[in-house]
Amino acid sequence: MRSCETLLQDLQNGECDGALSALYAPDGDPAKLDAARERAVRIAELYQTYFSPRQGAALFSGPGRTEIGGNHTDHQHGHVLCGSVDMDMLACAGPNDTDTIRVFSEGYPALAVDLNDPNPVESERNTSAALVRGVAAKIRELGYEVKGFDAFVTSNVLSGSGLSSSAAYEALIGNVVNRFFCENKLDAVQIAKIGQYAENVYFGKPCGLMDQMGASVGGCIAIDFNDPAAPAVRKVNYDFAASGHALCIVDTASSHADLTDDYAGIPQEMGAVAAHFGKRFLRDVPEADFRAAVPALREKCGDRAVLRAMHFYADDRRAVQEADALDAGDFSRFLSLVNASGISSELALQNAWSPSNPAQQAIPLTLAVGRELLGGAGAIRVHGGGFAGTIQAFVPMEKLDAFRTGIEALCGAGRCHVTRIRPQGGCLVAE
């Protein structure tokens, strides 16, 4: 591992351009490489200034993730399709010979986590410190001697963008600890599970594993959560860059505030349908049995619960069909399935707007405008949890400028983020 001074010089001299190109300029665009190099140099300089390190230093990346298929299917042990994106968290980090992990993230207060206290700290709940403590504690539990390190972090995974900044952060910290204290013995799936543990137990969010898998494993991946403790993961080898479409994530500028009950209502209602059959999850209920029981379920659980269960069965199938279409190189079929998923989320899952605030319908409005701009081409859908936040669109390149202009006229300048699926998950960039 290079000293911080040497790492900084090598970055400035272009010695790390190969690694940076693979992550940030795979198309060979010199402007993208220049921007990536400048970003890496700046973070190394800030790390050196902020921490005055005496040991070596390295660069690490934790990408955001995008849900491609399977909207609200993971918590029912279903199938999903997701991918890591080229918006990431980048850190310069190095060991500090103490029992304290110190992290400075641009735009946020500095944090320090004393590793002598491995237990969840109530005052840290819902903070980055909880994620750091949880990741370190779980890796120590696995038998590794985790010590202190310093890290300076920058991010373009926008908070609230639907790209899961918390999973990107967990993948980043997990890779730092893996390199410095585990001899890189942890694989990407293990790091994802460690991140989920930290988020569930220390941060206090009962999330599934999709976000962490998308950020840690990298590329486009199909996941079967039939056994959540050992999900089946496979890479989907499709070159999205060759599809002739841009992947756009649109921030609708709507607030996630006071939506906890809306989010919780989906697994609760799906679970109520499953409970009718003596099961906890819809994955364990044959669809034929569900269909036969619809009249009784309407009386017992309500129509919305029935519709949400219908969405689960359909979107669970679609996630598999989308992966199969990409494997076959049939992008038109894939786009048709993405559009069908979006319509199902709006009409059956009903997570496009909150009934507690019917005046706020930013997602349905943005979807309507987006469909007009696409004119029947591409695909568009609600992205992630829903009710507020983001939408996802696959936009033909010839329509991209007009689409972005039209969407930003509605949602605001800079709200349409053009990104791409990157093949690398959380990783060591250079050392």
Image: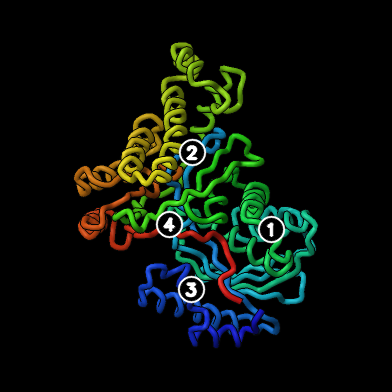
User: Quick one: label 1, few (<14), some, or many (20+) residues within 10 Å?
Assistant: some
What's the distance in space between the residues labelled 4 and 2, CA to CA?
27 Å
Query: Is 188 placed left or right of 34 in the picture?
Result: right
Query: Is 245 placed left or right of 216 in the picture?
Result: left
Residue 375 appears in the rendering: yes
What residue does disc 3 label?
Answer: 20
Identify which residue is drawn at 70% across, 70% down: 180
Work out whether mark 3 precedes mark 1 in sequence or the reverse, and give the earlier one: 3
What residue does disc 4 label?
Answer: 421
Q: Is residue 93 above or below residue 161?
A: below
Res 263 label: 2
Q: Are marks 3 and 4 in contact (CB under 8 Å)?
A: no
Identify which residue is drawn at 45% across, 38% down: 319
What residue does disc 1 label?
Answer: 186
Q: Find residue 14 and report its horizontal and vertical position in percent.
A: 48, 84
Q: Secondary structure at mark 3?
A: helix
What's the distance in space between the residues labelled 2 and 1, CA to CA?
32 Å
